[in-house]
Image: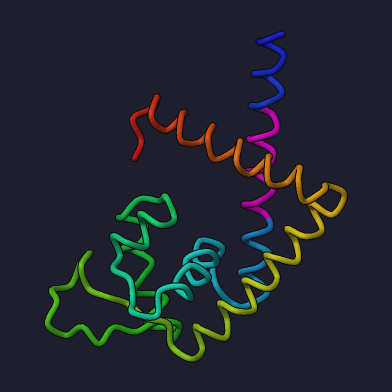
Amino acid sequence: MEKQRFTKFKKNIDGIHKSLQKLRIDLGNAEGVKGVHVFWLHDMLGHPEGQSAAEIAANNDIDKSLVSREITKLSKEGYIYSDDEGAKRGYNKKYRLTEKGVATAKKLGAAALALQAKASADISPEHLEIFYDSLEKIHVALAALAEVK
């Protein structure tokens, strides 16, 4: 029974991840950004004071080097800016959304929420609350076991 449950768990988690990756790429393509930028831009909406590359990486559970490589592209394309001239180039420089970035992030967020609503339309709010609570607990426990912070 436990082996079957693990197999089902792994298959579903891997499938969810693969589907999210595809949807993220599709959302990004629709708005003219790379898939990797989709959730960064959306996350930055909640941080009008700006975020450093290190904070973007931590909030999105991704490698700082990826953010470092990609942040310049977002800046050159007019989605983000930094008025933190005193900070050295690197992980502590704060980035904020431009007007273009805010508009794009709002569209991406609305599209992502619409997809989430469609995906969970047949699930009661009570079951969704239990699901997300359980999923978070499993994530925290597995991260602790893997020593991932």
What residue is at 75 percent from the left and 61 percent from the top? Answer: 115
Name of the residue lying farthest toward the right: 122
What residue is at 65 percent from the left and 51 percent from the top? Answer: 20
Percent across and percent down for residue 26 are 68, 64
Viewer-proximal residue among 63 and 49: 49
- Using the image, determine if residue 79 lies above or below residue 123: below
- Using the image, determine if residue 141 lies above or below residue 125: above
Percent across and percent down for residue 69 are 33, 63
- Using the image, determine if residue 18 lies above or below residue 6: below
Name of the residue lying farthest toward the front: 126
- The stretch drawn in magenta includes residue 6: no
In what quadrant of the picture does the N terminus appear?
Answer: top right
Q: Main secondary structure of the magenta part?
A: helix
Q: Is 94 on the left or on the right of 113, as rendered?
A: left
Colour treatment of the image = rainbow
- Toward which corner of the image does residue 96 lie, by quadrant? bottom left
- The stretch drawn in magenta includes residue 17: yes
Q: Is 7 on the left or on the right of 117, as rendered?
A: left
In what quadrant of the picture does the C terminus appear?
Answer: top left
Q: Which residues are magenta?
A: 11-22
Percent across and percent down for residue 74 are 42, 76
- Toward which corner of the image does residue 79 lie, by quadrant? bottom left
Percent across and percent down for residue 147 are 33, 30
Q: Is 72 on the left or on the right of 44, as rendered?
A: left
